[in-house]
Amino acid sequence: DKLFSWMPLTHDMGMIGFHLTAIVVGMHHTIMDTATFVRRPLLWLSEASNKRATILCSPNFGYKHFLKVFESKGIDALDLSPVRLIFNGAEPISVDICRQFMQAMQPFGLADNAMFPVYGLAEASLAVSFPEPQSPLQTLSLKRDQLGIGDPVVIDNEPAQSMTFVLVGKPIRDCHVRITDDDNTVLSDGHVGHIQLKGDNVTAGYYHEDEINRQLISDDGWLDTGDSGAFVDGQMVITGRVKDIIFVNGLNFYSHDLENILHPLDELELGKVVVDGARKPDSAEDELIVYVLHRGDIDRFMPLAQKIRKTLNTATGVEVQQVIPVKRIPKTTSGKVQRHRLTDEYLAGDYNELIAEMQAAGKALSGAGENEAANDIEAHISEICRNTVSDKTIGLDDNLFEIGISSLALAEIHEQLEADYPGKVEISDLFDHPTIRQLAAFLQQD
């Protein structure tokens, strides 16, 4: 076998799965710089083809990013017939993206049984469960309202009322997995519950996080992964995640970690800000939502919202979907924040009018409604930004790094600029000229 990976070595799949494992068993492997993949995703499979790699890997967003560029640009000669496994993990696996990718690559010789959906996490030294290698992709449609902890799984093939999941096989040797209810009582096959792990590969705890360790590791050593799932006929299906774990771009962020990043801001002391992930029914990814206790008017709130986006984006590289002012933060009688209640309200559309009002205020704040492009280059860059980040209003003088645009979106903007102005814009130039107006002036220099 020959491995080929673009996953960063700061990620457990990149480091353990596609670097250390290869070293231990003496396997040839190639590591592509992650930034190169982000800028030129087609190069991933081009180089894998050239090196006749047999095992690849990517989380959902990598396939999606590749397909987006592939559909617009296409690709020339490509031979994927040597590829026998493509590891798919690191975030909830999208059935639709798996099928789209496999169908798109089939003309290039990719075997229809190459997709290898797996389940793992850093706390288990990566691997937890694998399917049988080179077996067909297996999926299961379950009734949407029967996925709570303790619920028996109900197979339902009606799309309007079900969710389709990928089966991720059986636990690997010496890694023990159990499914439990909220009281740590073990549930039988066919019931949804908390996924817990035990084994020599499983961490003994988080460094200097005694309180978290007490919450997540039982007295007899079982680790609560924060994920929910079930065994169905002996195979694992991952149905969701604990509410305060947020999956973004193949990485998981803990709500309390992101909140701690924001607490140093003067207006956001402990208890006044909540960060949570929200997944809409038609989406394969979480939206990162920030709720802030605020009882003033919207205009006074907008600068704080922008500061929140900038702070989280700078610290983590993630894009905040919404920053929402709320008049109260729901808590239990013991004072524990109930993040899911705010997110349930968001998903129900309770904040839609408020979000529309903020978007209008944001447009006025940025001056985007009054600031007309002075030349064709400014107009063209504005169009690229609008097409790439359709949910944000970007003014000519807005700093792209301060309004909460993800690193992936910035890479897409750069890729389009490179296509339209070949050789004139390096990705580092975006840092030196971070506004549309500055970037246009830079491009006009000869």
Image: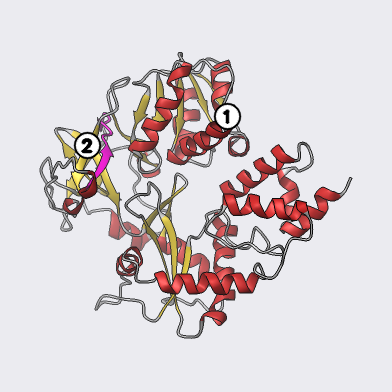
The part of the chain drawn in magenta is: 162-173
Quadrant location of residue 16? Answer: top left
Residue 1 visible within the image:
no
Q: Which residue is drawn at 56% across and 35% down?
A: 69
**Vertical placement of residue 298 versus 315, above or below:** below
**Vertical placement of residue 309 versus 181, above or below:** below
In the displayed structure image, the side of residue 306 where residue 445 appears, left or right: right
Q: Nearer the viewer, residue 384 or 22?
A: 384
Q: Which residue is drawn at 72% across and 64% down?
A: 372
> Element type at marker 1?
helix
Q: Which mark is residue 111?
A: none
In the rendering, at what x and y percent does residue 215 appear?
Answer: 29, 60
Q: Does the magenta stretch include residue 169?
A: yes
Q: Mark 2 points at which residue?
A: 140
> Element type at marker 2?
strand
Work out which quarter of the rendered image holds the N terminus and state it: top left
In the displayed structure image, the side of residue 260 where residue 246 appears, left or right: left
Q: Does the magenta stretch include residue 83?
A: no
**Vertical placement of residue 246 versus 372, above or below:** above
Q: Name the residue under label 1.
A: 42
Instruction: Tally the marks.
Output: 2
In the rendering, at what x and y percent does residue 391 appear?
Answer: 52, 58
Query: Could you tell which of marks 2 and 1 lies nearer the N-terminus?
Result: 1
Quadrant location of residue 365? Answer: bottom right
Q: Which of 434 and 205 is in front in this view?
A: 434
Disc 1 marks which amino acid? Answer: Leu
